[in-house]
Image (cartoon, rainbow, N blue to C red):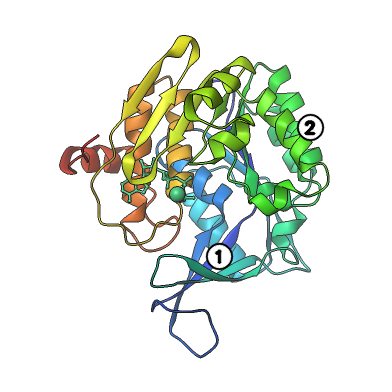
Amino acid sequence: DALGPTVVIGEILVEIMAKSRGDGFLEPIELIGPYPSGAPAIFIDQCAKIGGSAAIVASVGDDDFGRINIERLRSDGADVSAISVSPDYPTGSAFVRYRDDGSRDFVYNIGKSAAALVSLTAEAKALFARAGHLHVMGTAFAIPGAWEMMDHAIGVIKQRGGSVSLDPNLRKELLGLGQTQERFAKLVDVADLILPSGDELFMAAGVDGESAAVTALLARGVTEIALKRGEHGSTFFGPDGSRVDCRAFKVVEVDPTGAGDCFGGAYVACRRLGMPVFKALEYANAAGARNVTVQGPMEGAASRPQLDEFIAVTPRSLP
Ligand code: ATP
Ligand code: MG
């Protein structure tokens, strides 16, 4: 942390949720929102809230949807100096409705919103020049110019002795596009820490099977893998076959959105603060679990005292 803040690049959105479960938005239904959202925003909010030095490069519109995001991030301790405000485009948004089976219908306004305008502004450059860590999220690959920004940021941050983490939460459809596969593989090569969930482990490694994928990633220079297992907790894999498992907390899931992002924000912050792996996994599991008990994508992000309290009172699932 002494080297400078953890920086994330990507989309800021508001989420507006249907109050009832069902199929889509084809008739008038009750909605609740706007909630601050966007995977990178959730990540950095949790990172800041737990006590990490944290900053985001993003873009919002000159509207209330943008303002609630900036205000939330600022009040939770994130550096918002590199969030640009577009005079022409609205803040990105996502309308979400859960179906009975847990899957979701979306209406997005992202590609033609301010969220797609993230660029290497003077403020972003200044931020990278004093950053200690870059966290890359697969969702950001949809932003035009994101790759060039990430290349720039990685160059500058690595040059200063900083580190890089990667949450490959990228949609399969994106991997097929242009040079995405090749560029994604390059990111895996420069990443120090990878935080995959489910099949993303195999996608990142380009190899199937858990132990083969782990071995392949470590051979490519990744030094830490924090594998997210949803209601089954998480596992760390490191050099020389080291492995640490951390059981999940037993909670009632109200809204699964944001669990992986809160896990990542807490894990990266704790490791950069110098905590040992098990402690970081425990805080990360707690951050993910607590977030799913609250409605809204980042409404359950928590401070370190709140997580200490959560850990003290919440039972663990069996391994
Ligand atoms: P998302 O579903 O937000 O895309 P993800 O798939 O990247 O996230 P998950 O594994 O779903 O990540 O969640 C991250 C962490 O949060 C898990 O490793 C776990 O510790 C915790 N978590 C998530 N869901 C639950 C749950 N239902 N019960 C307990 N803990 C959970
Ligand atoms: Mg998940």
Vertical relation: 118 (above or below) 232: below
One can see residue 41 in this view? yes
Relative placement, left or right, of 236 versus 83 is left
| Drawn side of residue 230 relative to residue 119, left or right | left
Question: Disc 1 on helix, strand or loop?
Answer: strand
Q: Residue furthest bottom?
A: 27
Farthest front residue?
209
Q: Earlier in the sequence, mark 2 or mark 1?
A: 1
Q: CA distance from mark 2 to mark 1?
A: 28 Å
Identify whether 256 is placed above or below 95: above
| Spot occupied by residue 30 in the image (x, y as percentages of width and height) | 43, 84
Judge whether 210 appears above or below 8 on screen: above
Callout 2, which amino acid? His
Q: Residues within 10 Å of mark 1 (few under 14, many from 20)?
A: many
| Label 2 Cα neighbours within 10 Å, binned few <14 / some 14-19 / many ≥20 | some
Residue 169's x, y, as percent?
58, 45
Q: For mark 2, give the secondary structure.
A: helix
Residue at 73% x, 32% y is 153
Nearest the viewer among 262 and 210 is: 210
Query: Which corner quadrant of the image does residue 249 belong to?
Result: top left
To which residue does mark 1 refer?
A: 14
Along the horizontal axis of the image, is 5 left or right of 290? Answer: right
Can the viewer see residue 135 in this picture?
no
User: Which residue is painted at 51% across and 22% down in the image?
Assistant: 224
What is the number of the mark on residue 152? 2
Q: Amino acid at mark 1?
A: Val
Observer-nearest of 205 and 15: 205
